[in-house]
Amino acid sequence: MIIAILKTSKADLNIHYKKYFQIRIIIVLVLLIAAYKFSPDTSLPVPIKIDKYDWIDVEKINNTTRITRPPIPPRPQIPKVATAENIEEIEFDDTNIDLTANLDSPPELEKPSTRIVEEENHIPFFAFEVMPEIIGGLKSILKNVYYTEIAKRAQIENRVSIEFIVNKI
């Protein structure tokens, strides 16, 4: 069984909404009219009393010269349209090629030189059972590290990468 719940007139807040809105508008308008009606008169100027005079020194500023730009070039003239009366006939030279004539062979081009490609210095990697150690340990590296005085004062820190090549002893 489904029961429908209906709004009661006491629970519906929108019944009096229009009436309350109109009352609020009337109150706001009355307050604005009263504020304009009883505001102080600002039409009279208020005299300013000056106790001390501040003198301002005016410096003479030299006039600057205006850089004149070169004049704009004139617009190009409109080309004249050719009409049938002023067309000149152009004579063309003969461009026929004699295919039976003996032609010289084309010049020989230089043969490309053999290029030498240098191989990179590749350091082989070998896996070991015993890892290599730094002679003197990490302390020997840290005692040779030099920080400048400015870096110490500014507390500059960064990461440093060190690359080693391990040889036989």
Image (spheres, rainbow, N blue to C red):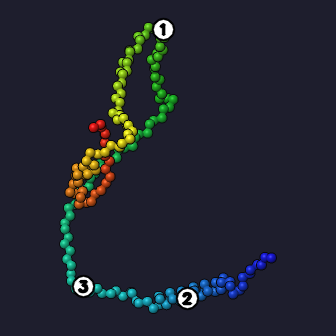
Name which residue lies at 59% across and 88% down: 23
In the displayed structure image, the side of residue 67 where residue 113 appears, left or right: right
Q: CA distance from mark 1 to mark 2?
A: 113 Å
Q: Could you say which is closer to the camera, residue 41 or residue 131?
A: 131
Can residue 145 be seen here? The reply is: no
Image coordinates of residue 121 in percent, x first then y, are 33, 33
Q: Mark 1 vs mark 2: which is more N-terminal? A: 2
Name which residue lies at 21% across and 83% down: 52
Q: Residues within 10 Å of mark 3 (few under 14, many from 20)?
A: few
Q: Amino acid at mark 3?
A: Ile
Q: CA distance from mark 3 to mark 1?
A: 112 Å
Q: Mark 3 vs mark 1: which is more N-terminal? A: 3
Q: Secondary structure at mark 1?
A: loop
Image coordinates of residue 150 in percent, x first then y, are 22, 57
Image coordinates of residue 3 in percent, x first then y, are 77, 78
Q: Secondary structure at mark 3?
A: loop
Q: Could you say which is closer to the camera, residue 74 or residue 37?
A: 37
Instruction: Check residue 51 in the rendering and tell me which mark sits there, or answer none.
Output: none
Contact between labelled residues 1 and 3, with CB atoms less than 8 Å apart: no
Q: Is residue 96 above or below residue 3?
A: above
**Mark 1 or 2: the one toward you:** 2
In the displayed structure image, the side of residue 55 where residue 120 appears, left or right: right
Residue picked out by circle 1: 100
In the rendered view of the protein, which quadrant contains the C terminus? top left
Residue picked out by circle 2: 27
Residue picked out by circle 3: 50
The picture quadrant where one finds residue 156 is bottom left
In the rendered image, the residue lying farthest to the bottom is: 38
**Mark 2 or 3: the one toward you:** 2
Q: Could you say which is closer to the camera, residue 28 or residue 66?
A: 28
Name which residue lies at 27% across and 60% down: 155
Name which residue lies at 23% across and 60% down: 153
